[in-house]
Image: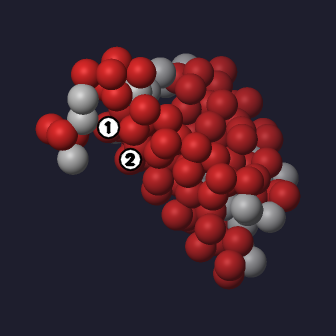
Amino acid sequence: MAEKRNLFDRALGLEEKKVWRAFEARAKALPADYFEDYKQMKKYIWLTGISKWRDIKFVFDHVLDMLEELAAEGRKVTDVTGPDVAAFLDDMADKNTWESKQREKLNKKVGK
């Protein structure tokens, strides 16, 4: 599909915006506590610097899949991620340059 995108679409990132809006709509459909966890994970992901759209799309798609499944089962996020949510996201993003300060902030806020 990317090959058929015109220059205008590529320059403005129209396809990416459409996908991002779909992610945000999925997140807003989550129960309140899972949506709050999503917002904290999203903040951590942005602060720690995934920069390629391909990686961003992968991480957010999988995070939302996980949250939707956990909400349906009535389980906590930490049931899947373990107590170190930041490390879970780091592994998902395949990044080793995350700031420990951001890890601590996320772990204090998610799943409480």
Q: Position of residue 99 (x, y in %)?
A: 55, 20
Density class for disc 2 (Cα within 10 Å; few <14, some 14-19, many ≥20) is few
Q: Secondary structure at mark 2?
A: helix
**Cα gap from disc 1 to disc 2, whole angstroms:** 6 Å
Q: Residue furthest bottom?
A: 73
Local secondary structure at mark 1: helix
Residue 3 can be seen, yes or no: yes
Q: Amino acid at mark 1?
A: Arg
Q: How is the image coloured?
A: secondary structure
| Residue 87 appears in the rendering | no
Kindly identify which residue carries mark 2: 58
Counting from the top left corner in percent of width and height, residue 75 is at: 71, 73
Disc 1: which residue: 54
List x then y, in percent, for residue 18. Answer: 49, 42
Q: How many marks?
A: 2
Residue drawn at x 24%, y 29% as measured from the top left: 6
What mark, if any, has residue 1 been given in the picture? Answer: none
Instruction: Give the x, y percent position of residue 107.
Output: 70, 41
Q: Is 32 on the left or on the right of 51, as rendered?
A: right
Q: Are marks 1 and 2 in contact (CB under 8 Å)?
A: yes
Residue sitting nearer the eye, 62 or 14: 14
Give left or right: position of 2 versus 54: left
Q: Give whichever of 10, 25 is nearer the camera.
A: 10
Q: Residue at x 59, y 21 (%)?
A: 47
Left or right: 100 as drawn, with respect to 59 = right
| Amino acid of disc 2 | Phe
Tell me if residue 92 comes above or below residue 43 in the rendering: below
Mark 1: few/some/many CA within 10 Å (<14, 14-19, 20+): few
